[in-house]
Amino acid sequence: MGRYVIRRLGQMVVVLFGATVVLFCCLFVLPGDPVGSLGGDKARDPAVVEQLRERYGLNDPLPVQYGNFVKNLAQGDLGEDFTQRRPVTEILQPKLVNTAELAITAIVIDIVIGLLAGLVAALFRYSFWDVLITLLTTMAVGFPSFVIGMVLQKAFVVELPWFPLISDGTVNSLILPAFTLAILDAALVARLMRGTMLEVLRADYVKTAIAKGLPRRTVLFKHVMRNSIIPVVTYLGISFGTLLGGALITEAIFNWDGIGLALVQAVQQQNNPIIIGVVSFGVAVFVLLNLIVDLLYAVLDPRIRLA
Amino acid sequence: MTTSSITAEVPRQRGEGAEGPVLEVRDLHVEFKTREGVVKAVNGVNYSVSSGETLAVLGESGSGKSVTAQAIMGILDSPPGRVSKGEILFQGRDILQLPESERRKLRGPKMAMIFQDALSALNPVFSVGNQLGEMFRVHQGMSKKDAKAKSIELMERVKIPAARSRVNDYPHQFSGGMRQRIMIAMALALEPDLIIADEPTTALDVTVQAQVMDLLADLQREYNMGLILITHDLGVVADVADKIAVMYAGRIVEQAPIHELYKRPAHPYTRGLLDSIPRLDQKGQELYAIKGLPPNLLKTPSGCAFNPRCPKAQDICRTEVPALLPVTERDGTELAGRGSACHFREEQLHG
Amino acid sequence: MSELTKSTAGAGPAQTAPAAPAEPAIARVTQWGEIRHRFLANKLAVIGLVLVALLFLVAIFAPLLSPHDPYAQDLTNTLQGPGGDHLLGTDALGRDQLSRILYGSRIAVVVGLASIFLACVIGIAVGALAGYFGRGTDSVLMRIADVFFAFPLLIGAIVIIIVMGRGVTPVIISLAVFSWPTVSRLLRSSILSVREADYVLAARALGANTRRIILRHILPNSIAAVMAYAAFNVGGAIVAEASLSFLGVGVSPEVPEWGNMLAAAKDFMGVKDYLWTYPSIAIVLTVLGFVFVGDGLRDALDPKLR
């Protein structure tokens, strides 16, 4: 196990290194001036631009720039942003908390609704509930998060004024965005859960468990569940990328002050340090999460050989 | 249906004490609803096992031998399967009448089952110690620690080397023979009165088969349990079984004390099975094979289900279902414990 | 018993395939024929196929079907509800909603197909090389794939668009650049599983060269998985494209495109709901169409996965 973790950590470093190269190439090497519209139209003054370029180290040779870029990134120093001249970390930190709040709530909803729906559908196969759940989860896959968000807004803000349109920081305003973000994944988790569980229910070891005289709940929640959630855990790891993408949309719809909204605004303002901050963070978390899921997978399924 | 005619009671076996057999199956019918129609998997089976006795149930796949066992254990897949008729008397009471909660309490302490393929029958994600200990924790409310100690004891009992260090290993880390020993240990855990072993050695190497079978036979003697040994291999059962029931298309076609069956089969199907065992003294001759395929249970042939494959089939075999009736010696004395469902059972026996 | 359940469970798809005994002459059911048969026996897949076909027709004949010029502004007729001359109403600039939705299908089709096609081309090339050569080539190529896989799709796409600017081509490229690793991984694992298969060993024993083995023996058997992926993910690509536009980083805002329309409609939530409902319906039907086709294709290609 230990050796495997080290090898995977090594791979992770390689991947992160590669990702910084891609990011650096896109934002610094390829044509397009990062100082571009910095400071509004007045900044077009060549002297000002030059001063800014110097200030952000854009006149150094590329390898030096890259070295500094990675060094700063590794130290968690993302520099100052272009518009407010404040440290990027300071700007992003509260937004990060907001996004995490949204994402974690969504994941909890995913797991609870997804597992429950999949469980019910599998246990009562071909029943009314199974048909309903299968139908809903099949349809849900076709609904992009922005459509879901707008439908929810229409239903629960406009028609039934239960929730505020724009987030006001209360728990109440968290619910609609979290559901918007969660519904697609919950549907996919439910489908996955149903499929795996139907397979597991047919397995010989379930028959053994019944033949051992175990109570139904032990058979279900120990022997069946434990085997059924393995693919779900893997899926949740991979789906984090989709979740981050969904967070961009959800935050835009509900004006949720998170890093997704910050990214979109930064793109419009060509505020590169913020972009770099959000993108690097997204990549790092995604990679780390995939590693954790792989390790968890090995823990959940002892047949997986770590080599 | 002529199946009920077997009330011509199979004669009593040795060892059946005053309290009667541990298990008695009476006129059991099991059917499965499928998209193509109702599959009648078991059509009126009768058999009994006493303490310390081994009954071998022999048959091809689809003969209903495993379905009968699952019906006894109460682990039929239902739906689609269900017991449509019959009684299963366990220690004198009909367990088919018991509520599921009561039946569950029988499984483990009173009756247990050993499955064919231990690799798929053991849960891959729990250690064997956990799965063995579960018996004690669930049925006897034992603490985790005690249950683990018991598990180690059990593993030693079935002769697994280094039990103490292997108790936390997972099923896939054991060899096939060792895994089957673990299955046996699990079935024996609470010293049940009846064990059903469904082809316990089929998935094993030939060299290991004998070891596992011996172990099972030893333990059965030691605990004086009733044992139902389901198999399709006549060779496996000769040394361990007391009596045998041969099944075909959901019915028992022949019943006999084991050695008599080998000596003088009273049903053409049994004859065919015996003839298809390779024998050293017939080296060089072509091996016998029963022609044709096992019957389709959706539409079993009319009359005797075996008639399309039977070398001696007559007109009556295609029209009338033969009942399982006692077989007699030439002088008319009934042979104890023997029965055959063949219109020409006497000819088969003496001819 | 186990034999019994297996036979009844397997009876569904496997036994529907053989041709009816009524027509013995055309007995030779090819593998593709069987796949097509299974696909067409799946109701959802057929619905999906119809939806996709409709989408293509609308995209091709958008100019003929549209009652108005989707770009034409009419500031005297802004925000008109559905009905009259404008069947689905007009937007804040007086542009005809119906025409814009119809034209929007063109962007959806072009971006959806082109980006997935591009992703498949790159992915198949990389995956085939990695899977066939193994060892060093494999680990280098797969680490590269890992790097691109590490970017969540929308976030990666935004980075590319920052470089290339907004527009249809940048959106296609940006989606393809971060989608191909999935194809590579899929193909590679499927190749790894067939590489040691007997028929490939047989081909090698008969002296077939590497290129021939890849093209003739390995790819055709691995491509099935990729095809199902592609069909399923065209829908995903269309959603991603609309998402980018919705966020204001996709195609230019004046272009008739569903994400753009929804972004503009967002401000009229609860006031002018027709602005977002109709484009939403268009995109949902489109995505469902591709998802159903993808699901149906996957099941038809590998009935075991059901």
Image (cartoon, coloured by chain):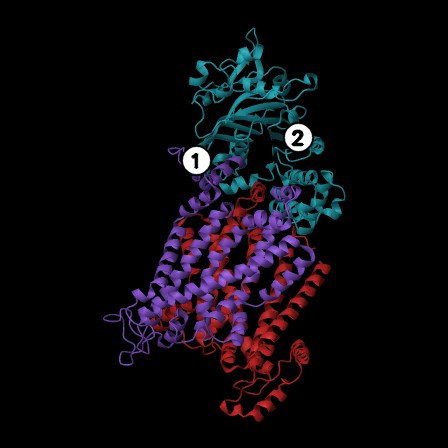
Chain colours: A red, B cyan, C purple
Q: Which residue is denoted by mark 2 in the rendering? A: B224
Residue ID at (43%, 64%): C110
Q: Give the number of callouts.
A: 2
Residue ID at (30%, 65%): C64
Residue ID at (48%, 65%): A182
Most foreground residue, B277 or C118:
C118
Q: In the rendered view, does A228 fall on the left or right side of A17?
A: left
Q: Are marks 1 and 2 on the same chain?
A: no
Label 1–label 2 contact, CB within 8 A: no
Most foreground residue, B164 or C9:
C9
Q: Which mark is residue C184?
A: none
Using the rendered image of the protein, determine whether residue C118 is visible from the camera's viewpoint. yes
Chain letter for the residue marked with disc 1 in the picture = C
Residue type (three-letter) at the residue carrying disc 2: Asn
Q: Quadrant of residue C270?
A: bottom left
Q: Secondary structure at mark 1?
A: loop
Most foreground residue, B140 or A58:
A58
- Vertical side of B221 occupied by C187: above or below: below
Where residue B178 appears, x then y in whole percent? 70, 40
- Vertical side of B310 occupied by A101: above or below: below
Chain letter for the residue marked with disc 2 in the picture = B
Where residue A81 appears, x then y in whole percent? 57, 84
Q: Which residue is denoted by mark 1 in the rendering? A: C27
- Vertical side of B216 occupied by B126: above or below: below
Where residue C100 appears, x then y in whole percent? 34, 70
